[in-house]
Image (tube, rainbow, N blue to C red):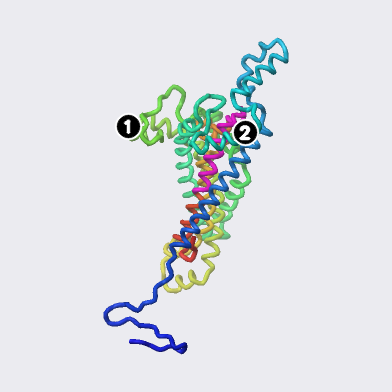
Amino acid sequence: MIVATPGDAALPLASEGGVRGAVRRPHRLGPRLANLGRHLAGSVAVVLTVITITFLVTRVFAPNPTALFLSPAGNGFVSAAAAAVEKTKVEASLGLGKPLVVQYYRFIDQLVHANLGNSFESGRPVTSELLQRLPATAELAVYALVLGVSLGIVVGVIAAVKRDGIVDHLARLFTVAGLSLPQFWLGLMLLWLFFTKLGIAPGPVGRLPIGVSPPPRITGFYVVDGVLGGDWSTALDAAKQLVLPVVTLGVGLATPICKIVRSSMVEALNSDYVRTAAAMGFGRRRIYLVYALKNGLLPVVTVLAGIIGYTFAGSILVEGIFGWPGVGNYAFEAIQNSDFPAIQGFVLYAAILYVVIYELLDFVYTLIDPRIRI
């Protein structure tokens, strides 16, 4: 059947046999691929910019790393001229005596070949050292995220539902205190109270007490590996070592989530669709968790992306306080010793981590709110 339009055009309608005359939608693969290409190009540009700035800062402002190699024999030089000659030899062996442009070209060439160089301090490949320390940071980050996200959402929801009550005021006090107090200070106070004064927590000696051997490596998480291997004593020791650093990080992660969840929930609970759902007789639990909380997830997801990047990049000061052998502590030691390859390797790892997380965040946005398109 043909229907005439005012413009003398004819549009075929669907016949009984199917939809032969249906109008095809424009093909969207091309724009999507172009958008994906722009995202990848932007990500590469961000990573390259970050590592370039790091390269320049370490070479221009950081102390000269030759002290790492000269300090043991520094008193043996009979004259300043002999010390200068030895320093020149060390700089040449490290490749630091060449112009910055040449050093930068060499650095980029190494990156292209997936080579982060060798640490000045240990002499080992930076890639190997980062991979060796990553499970420690990952174990601490996962447990801290579970604690922080759970605590932040639960306290935020309760504060919004009981707003202007005693629970809400306590939640606000918790949020303000958590946002204003530095995490390293909280970690020091927890150590002072539970380790020094009460003696009920283990000391800041890393993932296991001194003298305890790690369990057989399965996942890299000592608690999980101990349980899977049947070594319950080691698993318990590893869990005890995790308590204080996990609480320190978890409380710091919970406070911004709590604040955002409360604000989003309060706004949602005052909306028309929530009042309509209540008038139609829906239960409170469904209204709070399905309608109010779900529709306030976008700002929570945004903050959560930054929190995940922060924890997996390693909280440098927290890991340093507890002697945690993760990538954050690795970066802290590298900064202290002007270990340029180690610093650059850590910054590259952190930059790629954040870029990947925020690219995934764009995709998660489309799942939460289908109106958003990448």
- Depth order, front residue of 366/28: 28
- Give the magenta-colored segment's residue range: 333-356
Examine the rendering and report whether any part of residue 193 can be seen.
no
- Relative to 25, residue 74 above or below: above
Upstream in the sequence, badge 2 or badge 1? 2
> Which of the two marks, 2 or 1, is nearer to us in this view?
2
Residue visible at 50% across and 27% down in the picture: 205
* Left or right: 316, with 128 as reference point: right
Q: Nearer the viewer, residue 58 or 212?
A: 58
Residue 234's spot in the image, x, y percent?
Answer: 39, 29
Q: Amino acid at mark 1?
A: Gly
Quick check: is 25 in the magenta stretch? Answer: no
Residue at position x 47%, y 73% in the image: 276
Give neighbour class at mark 1: few <14, some 14-19, many 20+ (Cα, 10 Å).
some
Q: Residue at x 62, y 43 (%)?
A: 181
Element assignment for label 2: helix
Label 2 Cα neighbours within 10 Å, binned few <14 / some 14-19 / many ≥20? few
Question: Can you tell which mark lies on residue 229?
Answer: 1
Q: Is residue 342 magenta?
A: yes
SS of the residue under disc 1 = loop
Task: In this rendered view, identify the residue nearer to me: 51 or 88.
Answer: 88
Residue 43 visible here:
yes
Do the residues bearing badges 2 and 1 touch, measured as CB atoms within 8 Å?
no
Where is residue 46 drawn, in percent x and y? 57, 47
Question: Relative to residue 143, is residue 295 depicted above or below?
Answer: below
Q: Position of residue 1 (x, y in %)?
A: 33, 87
Q: Which residue is mark 2?
A: 102
130 displayed left or right of 192: left
Residue 213 - label: none
